[in-house]
Image (spheres, rainbow, N blue to C red):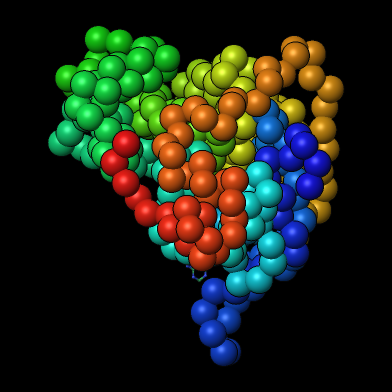
Amino acid sequence: MNNGTLISLRAITKTYGEGVAAFQALKGIDLDIAAGQFVAIMGPSGSGKSTALNILGCLDAPTSGAYGFRDIPVEALTRNQRALLRRHYLGFVFQGFNLLSRTSAQENVELPLLYRGAESAQRHAAAREALAQVGLTGWEHHTPAELSGGQQQRLAIARAIVTCPLVLLADEPTGNLDSQRGHEIMDLLVALNREQGITVIMVTHEPEMAHYADRVVKFVDGVVESDSRKERHTPVPPPAPLVRGESQPLRSVLSSPDKGRPGGVGELRETSP
Ligand code: ADP
Ligand code: MG
């Protein structure tokens, strides 16, 4: 894997179910994604886009194949270690926002930090900052029901970036929005990519939204059918340093993928900072 490569998939397959009911959703995906890229994954419904995104996001494991994240062989990690990788490096945005409806905007955004055991003062400050980045200052104490669809998706983005992830994974983030709100969400994703160097991997079936990406990967029937890139006119900031929001235990995952060695991956546990 070369230096700029953040993510590398090799011969990834995914089969759902068993026996006669088995269905192969991914039939051998090879994909390298460089740090700082903005990638759109397109393709017809059922072509395996969400399955691939869930594997990239460590929400699901492939049936076979190799997934490298900064040279870490993800398939060799334990469930707990994959959860750590997810919590510290990855942010998610979904089509349906997936917000807690009776909980304030501020508390929705704080949630990932709560899982990480952050102190309340730190959580409050980071959540306010993330809400400001998505243009929701002043809406901290409102519940999602009091926000428009576009604002709810911006709130979900604030929740995804509050942990300073290296990668933002978005599954049809504009699918429930009208065109203007959709473009506002895309402008925000572009800004996070360009200004903060967050790698963005977005599933969409709307060509006008894919147009914002540097690269479009098309899936058909569980394989990559095409992969096209365009020249970028604005310089890419250097990839976010590994230490962003990172706690000591995770650094040891990344520096020492060596099971069983004291202090190495075998020792990894979720701990409060
Ligand atoms: P896309 O996001 O491109 O629409 P998906 O990745 O969601 O496609 O699904 C790919 C295929 O795998 C579809 O045929 C879908 O029905 C099937 N599939 C997805 N999830 C499951 C599951 N949990 N169990 C069985 N089949 C599934
Ligand atoms: Mg899907």
Give the percent coordinates (x, y) of residue 270.
Answer: 35, 50
* Picture residue at 84% right of the left edge, 22% below the top: 231
Rendered-image quarter of ligand 1: bottom right
In the rendered view, tell whether residue 129 sits above or below residue 249: above
Direction bottom: furthest residue? 19
* Picture residue at 66% right of the left edge, 71% below the top: 64
Question: Residue 248's image quarter?
Answer: top left
Left or right: residue 156 versus residue 58 is left
Question: Residue 163's image quarter?
Answer: top left
Question: Residue 140's image quarter?
Answer: top left
Give the percent coordinates (x, y) of residue 39.
Answer: 68, 36
Direction top: furthest residue? 138
Question: In this orientation, which residue lies closer to the viewer: 90 or 228?
Answer: 90
Give the percent coordinates (x, y) of residue 62.
Answer: 59, 66
In the rendered view, tell whether residue 129 sits above or below residue 182: above
Q: How many marks?
A: 0
Left or right: residue 103 versus residue 39 is left
* Picture residue at 61% right of the left edge, 38% below the top: 201
Q: Quadrant of the C terminus?
A: top left
Left or right: residue 138 versus residue 258 is left
Question: In this orientation, which residue lies closer to the viewer: 155 or 121?
Answer: 121
Give the percent coordinates (x, y) of residue 6.
Answer: 68, 40
Residue 148 visible in the picture: no
Residue 140 visible in the picture: yes
In the rendered view, tell whether residue 10 sits above or below residue 139: below
* Picture residue at 68% right of the left edge, 21% below the top: 238
